[in-house]
Image (tube, helix red, strand yellow):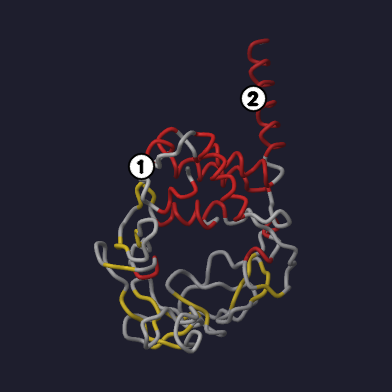
Amino acid sequence: MLPALALVASCSHKDNALADKISTVGGFCNEWATRACNANVVKHCAAASQDDCVSSQQDFCESLVPEDEYSPKTALDCLTAVEKAYQQDSLDADDLQTVLHLGNQCSKILSGKGTAGNSCTADSDCDTDSNLACVKKGSATGMCETPSNPPIQGGYSCKADEAVCADGFYCDGSDCLADKSQGDDCSASIPCDAKSHCLDAQGNVVGSGESADGGASTGTCAARKSTGSDCTSDDDCTSLICEISSGSTNGVCADQVSFAPSEEICKNLR
């Protein structure tokens, strides 16, 4: 039994050491960077060394995670997702959301002080450790609530503070309505479906602030572009990936992003 007990003790020690390490932003981001900078990434992003990759990626991670909002509660889930993403030869839109924008399994890394009923503009304003999220009803601000599970289906009331609509529907303040489609009027609070996006008369995303008036409040749903089409932002593409080489402003809609020195994804990996 002694060898087995020794193995259990060894594993426990490693688990405790990792928990201690990721209890701070610096430790979490060092672990993130170490998992991201595997031999394949170092090679294809043309990093001078793994240490250089880790240093650059740690700086990037720390830019995403404010010290006063970091919560280690779901850190291991996030780190596992980051490690898995970078073990692949390319990244899809979900992977990019995870490793560039703290999406998916990393979405609860930031936890605010907002309790149930508090005003919010983003999930990170709320106490995500208590499963609160910023539930919005067609406006830029919402309330910290535990989102309804399962989500509300189309045609049913979303008046309850905690009510969130299922994918493909939005809350107009009263009911869950189907997202708008190509050619329909839209706004920041009336969204388009996944195949289109809301553009103003100048072709700018509504509310982006890029148009002459600082960002129109309404627009029309326009079809997103297919793989291989020219693009200037991820929002242009059905795949939600506009592959733009480093130093350029124009790119092409792609299903995935590969690791290469000229790719933007490698900027913080070398």
- Left/right placement of residue 113 relative to residue 205 reads right
Name the one closer to the observer, 168 or 250: 250
> Residue 128: which quarter of the image?
bottom right
Q: Dot 1 corresponds to which residue?
A: 89
Q: Dot 2 corresponds to which residue?
A: 11
Of helix, strand and loop, which one carries label 1? loop
User: Residues under labels 1 and 2: Cα distance?
Assistant: 30 Å
Residue 189 percent across, percent down from the top left: 51, 82
Name the one closer to the observer, 242 or 48: 48
Look at label 2 and name its amino acid.
Answer: Cys
In the depicted structure, whether residue 70 falls above or below residue 149: above
In the depicted structure, whether residue 17 falls above or below residue 123: above
Residue 217 percent across, percent down from the top left: 49, 87
Name the one closer to the observer, 23 or 263: 263
* Residue drawn where x is 47% and y is 87% of the image: 216
Residue 245 percent across, percent down from the top left: 35, 56
* Residue drawn where x is 36% and y is 82% of the image: 203
- Left/right placement of residue 92 relative to residue 135 reads left
Between discs 1 and 2, the one toward the N terminus: 2
